Image (cartoon, rainbow, N blue to C red):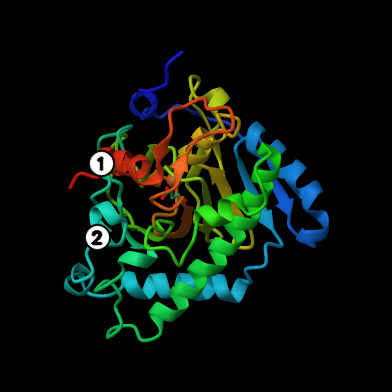
Amino acid sequence: MTHTTHTLEELAKETRMGGAGTETSAREVRRIDLTDFDRRKEEITGELWAAATDIGFFQLVNHGIGPDVVDRAFADAEAFFALPEHTKARHALKKGLNSGWESMTQVRPSVNTPDQKESYQVTRPHMDGLWPDDALPGFRGRVLDFEARCRDLAMRVLSCFADGLGLPDGFFTRAHDPASPNYQSTLRMLHYFAVPADAVVPANVWRAGAHTDFDCLTLLFQRAGQGGLQVCPGKEAEAQEWTPVEPDGSVITCNIGDMLMRWSDDRLPSNFHRVRSPGPGDDRSARHSIAFFAQADRDVVIEGPEGRYPPITAADYIQQRIAANFAR
Ligand SMILES: O=C(O)CCC(=O)C(=O)O
Ligand SMILES: [Fe+2]
């Protein structure tokens, strides 16, 4: 068996995921309580592993990032997006580096239309010229602090997966080193545009088209009442049955990305998800979310314990996916 075309296979699969499909709430998105993490790590690892391999998406509760900190991060994100277009344009996306602001440029291979959103990416080593220091004093420091908290939490969760995979202590923490110039984990603030009351949204226009994430692990913060996220576990991919993830400001929704799927020799599956546009009876106001993507440092070689796929650097891996996902 050869897997040299792995990434291309993923893309081919993605192009088949653009249809409306059907909706089911038969599946639960499990909640994992991180209280007393160090003492309960083995038990938590069992729960995380079961949720990750069963449904793929899971939610963290009592995760240690307080509501005031999360509210502050959303307030900062909203303040950034409220800046005039020409100010945001001064901090435009450095595409290959996943840093800076973009609007309507992400085109998922599943749907071929731009996501109806703007986003601001923070990837530590590449932020020169991208901070709105004049317009938003204090923004830089708070956002970097939030990024660090997200990373610490992601490393805790990944350390459980390392245990499950039989990898050494600290394995993923060493692979995501914020002091390294090769660091490429990203904090992403998202603003999905309000939809005018009289607008009819075409079926192929999504807030975020169906996709899997490129990374190892995603932490997603949502706001209560701002729904639309739907997931489709691998098992249902052919049937295209989508389950809504109800937003709850106190939990962090997590999913495995393609990088960890490959790194685990497919034992930990990534999952398709999407954000649908508001339908006729839905709230049409703007939607905000914040995602942290744990992506191994550029120079780290992704190679599973069983060697199922050829080794590839994390830089090459992410590059292939960015190239397929952005219009310009
Ligand atoms: O905004 C959301 O709820 C999901 C965002 C997402 O899936 C992504 O940016 O990869
Ligand atoms: Fe995603």
Q: Is disc 1 placed on a helix, strand or loop?
A: helix
Tell how many labels.
2
Name the residue rendered at 60%, 56% in the picture.
Answer: 155
**Nearer-the-camera pick, 67 or 19:** 67
Asked whether mark 2 lies closer than 8 Å to ligand 1, one says: no
Residue at image position (65%, 56%) is 156
Seen at 19% across and 71% down, the residue is 90
Q: Check disc 2 and report its element: helix, strand or loop.
A: loop
Q: Is residue 26 visible?
A: no
Is residue 25 positioned above or below 291 on the image?
above
Q: Which mark is residue 93?
A: 2
Residue found 59% across the figure and 32% down from its top: 305
Question: Hey, which quadrant is residue 186 in on the image?
Answer: bottom left
- Crowding at mark 2 (Cα within 10 Å: few <14, some 14-19, many 20+): many
CB at mark 1 closer than 8 A to ligand 1?
no
Q: Quadrant of residue 57?
A: top right
Task: Find residue 205 and report its horizontal and vertical position in percent.
Answer: 30, 40
298 sits to left or right of 39: left
The three-letter code of the residue at mark 2 reads Leu
Residue 76: give x, y in percent of width and height: 42, 75
Q: Is residue 36 left or right of residue 201?
A: right
Query: Residue tagged by mark 1?
Result: 323
What is the C-alpha distance between the residues marked 1 and 2? 14 Å
Note whether 142 is above or below 106 in the view shown: below
Residue 140 image-quadrant placement: bottom left
24 w.r.t. 130: above or below: above
Amino acid type at mark 1: Ala
Q: Mark on residue 243?
A: none
